[in-house]
Image (spheres, rainbow, N blue to C red):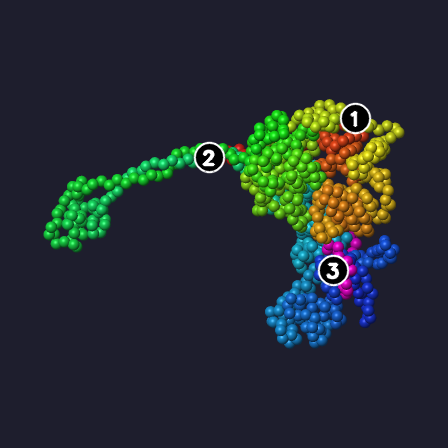
Amino acid sequence: MPARLQEIEGTFRRQRYRFDDCIIGEIELPANGTPGEWLTIKGDAEDGELIRGGRYRFYGRFAKYRNKRSGVEEKQFHFQTFVPALAHDREGVVAYLAAAGQGFGMGKATAEKAFDKFGGDAVSVIRQSPRELLSLNNRITPEQCDAIADKLNQQKATEDATIELTSLLAGRGLPKVTSRNAIKKWGNQAAEIVKRDPYSLMNFRGCGFKLCDKLYLEMGLPADKLRRQALCAWHSVASQSDGHTWYPAMAVVQAIRQAIGSAKARPKAAVGLAMRLGRLSPDHYGALAGIKTDGASGPIKEDGSHPWLAEGRAAKSEESLASMLAEAIAESSPKPITSFGQEIVSWREAVEAIKCNRCGRLLTAPEVHVWDGKPFGPTCIGYISDGTDVDVLPLGDWFNQQPDIIRSQIVTVPRGKIDLPPFSLWPDPTNIDGIDQHQRDKLTEALVSRVAILGGSPGTGKTYATAMLIRALLKSGRVGPEDIAIGAPTGKAAVRLTEALQAAGVELTARTWHSLLGVGQSEDRGGWSFLHNERNPWTFRVIVGDESSMVDLSLMRSIFAARPRGCHVLLVGDVHQLPPVGAGAPLRDMIASKSIGYGELTEIKRNSGGIVEACAAIRDCQRWEPGDNLSIWESDPEKNEIERAIFLLDRARANGFDPVWDCQVLVAVNDRSELSRKKINRILQQELNTNPEVKGTPFRQGDKIVCLKNGRYPMVDKDAGDEVYVANGELAEVIAVEDKRLLAKLIISRDEVLIPRGNSSGDDDAATGCNWDLAYALSVHKSQGSEWPVVIVMLDDYAGARLVCDRSWLYTAISRAKSKCFLVGRRHVADAMCRNQAIGKRRTLLREQLQRKIAKGVIEELA
């Protein structure tokens, strides 16, 4: 059974310190008529939520805190939640009523009068008979009295719900702020909502399916309920981290049967329920999408033989990205317009002589009556003449006597359709200075539409060619510096690109995609929203993105969602590198669709010795050889792989390199292996950081650390801003280590941030207590977009590593080095990696969806 939280009650006296939403304050415990003992409390409370003099009931646990500076130890109460408590003494009742009456005309003075008149029953009297307040305060209105009663009743219901919900969730492993978040979202209905549907807690960050499912089962709810089966189906897809977008439907069916049991499993109905949710709300947890293909790797087909399932939000991202790409490509197509010409159009007008002079109607009777030279019909003539001096003529004779009147006009008429040539901001590659013919040819292949892709392995000059292209754009006068945005997936990549642009004479600054898109507040489930999107697009006319192979499906979709109509996009990247950490492989799929202009640079321009030559050989599936700055160091009985790595770091130090910041060890896996990231980091910390250990934390002052998850962190210097966004993979240096937090300096921006430690999130790393870890060794995935003067790559023969490492892994690892690269391990391990190509195994359907949408657009145009 989950452990119950302890409960204390006291009067809030003062706030000692506030850190974000965390407060450290003091309460006075109740005593019999004498001043009570003061106790330090710590927990999450919004600014102003705890009112001085207010009585509260806190739920949490006692803890001991030792001040490292003074050595003094004190008893504290760390609360998870709290509710206002009604004390029946004068001070408690007055504070309770004054808090409820704030904004409704009842302050402390009126609350004191209420206590003087009704005593300890003042609160219940006002709840039931609020108009009693009229006799205590002649300025309060009946409507305000009723509002105070409503607030008191609502507060009572919320207090009861908070107590019930706190008791229900205590010890379940959920984040400590869950009950307070639920109360904020659902009010006094929170406990009933959670009891009825524990999965509703998945709306909140840190409340994953496994924790909520465990709560569901512990509450004795039916394990075979169809909604639970649908969520099991969704979780079998959403929990995968192998980068696929689509999964075989049969694998999902097997997952349902395994979770529920074959006898009670209803996979067809469960998947159907999840797919219905996906059609209504694809971003909601539990949503699935389905599609069929003709064969395992064939085209999309409604009656295809192979059904596939995807998480709703991933399927939505893929489909909408395909639509946006198709629309951008269509902007570049020749636009048919109607041509017009001028012609003379003539016609015969009816003159007054063929109309009755009295009524104005056309003459149609067989005879025309003419009086005084004017025509009249047989009826109208009787109104104006007695028949004297009236001539009667046949209608035809009268018409023949009248002259013809011909009218003509010059009019504009359609002549046919002509195709207008597409307008392009891209400069003609033949006019770009500073590039050779090979680069010019590949740019020509790429710049055929509003969306273009330029690829190339290390040393082929793709960054330089991009800089020359941007310089030519600016020289053309069609765009200014303010019209061009340059993005990269990481801060390190943005800095590298900025340096390369400035070296080429282009004074523009690259920024991370998250910075360009503008990171909004986190959503309930911990996702991030962007300020720029379809409803609020950028104002840029040209967008250039570097390291585009790192961009996953979700981020690529966000980039194109923020693209305004007519904006030109150039994606620069190396498709031979590792695919993105997240789902999808959009750059690969866009190239494979053959719908977007793509030029790949293959001729090596930079003289970087063995590193560049090895990358080119791996790219071309050829055997590679060590060179002057690339070598293999095999382990031997006297030195194992880790000892070899330490030896190489020492040698780098002797050659003037900083072994911590100029060197980087790259590994295959995070745990379990003898060459895992966690094990090597512990060893390298001992070797490279001489600062003393700090009890209760794995970090030391001076440590090199890496962010494991996107997030916002408070800044030390409040004048520079309240918070800073830190992306997954960013590096920092530990400045100070405190009991429950770190002070760290980000390597790229040099901002100093506060990193809280402790189980503040269900996603926290168990070993470090936060979303950061040591970074003396990094996984190759985390290293993407970065480079170091010296890189040491650990060739791991562990079975789990063989599942991770392929040709693109080794290619990416080697290409992280600027000056020297050392491979530590056996040559046959590296050769085995080169024989394995895993990127093509990612199951996505962006290519097929893009091709279908473009074909549909062509058919509609022809129709």
Where in the figure is residue 114, as x and y percent of width and height?
69, 73
Give the crowd class for mark 3: few <14, some 14-19, many >=20 residues within 10 Å: many
C-alpha separation, residue under disc 1 versus residue under disc 2: 60 Å
The answer to whether marks 3 and 2 mark residues whose Cβ atoms lie closer than 8 Å is: no
Where in the figure is residue 806, as x and y percent of width and height?
72, 30
What amino acid type should be assigned to the residue bearing mark 1? Arg
Give the crowd class for mark 2: few <14, some 14-19, many >=20 residues within 10 Å: few
Horizontal side of residue 270 vs 660, given as left or right? left
Element type at mark 2:
strand
Residue in front for this viewpoint, 224 or 46 = 46
Sooner in the amino-acid sequence: mark 3 or mark 2: 3
Give the crowd class for mark 1: few <14, some 14-19, many >=20 residues within 10 Å: few
Q: Where is residue 102, by image quadrant?
A: bottom right
* Marks 1, 2: nearer the viewer: 2
The answer to whether marks 1 and 3 mark residues whose Cβ atoms lie closer than 8 Å is: no
Q: Is residue 16 magenta?
A: yes
What amino acid type should be assigned to the residue bearing mark 3? Phe
* Marks 1, 3: nearer the viewer: 1
**Is 559 located above or below residue 596 in the figure?**
below
Sooner in the amino-acid sequence: mark 1 or mark 2: 2
The residue labelled by disc 3 is 82
Q: Is residue 752 magenta?
A: no
Boundaries of the magenta span: 1-23
* Marks 3, 2: nearer the viewer: 2
The answer to whether marks 1 and 2 mark residues whose Cβ atoms lie closer than 8 Å is: no
Residue 336 numbered tag: 2
The residue labelled by disc 1 is 827
C-alpha separation, residue under disc 3 versus residue under disc 2: 68 Å
Residue at horizontal 68 percent and vertical 55 percent from the top: 182
Residue at horizontal 63 percent and vertical 75 percent from the top: 138
Residue 582 in view here: no
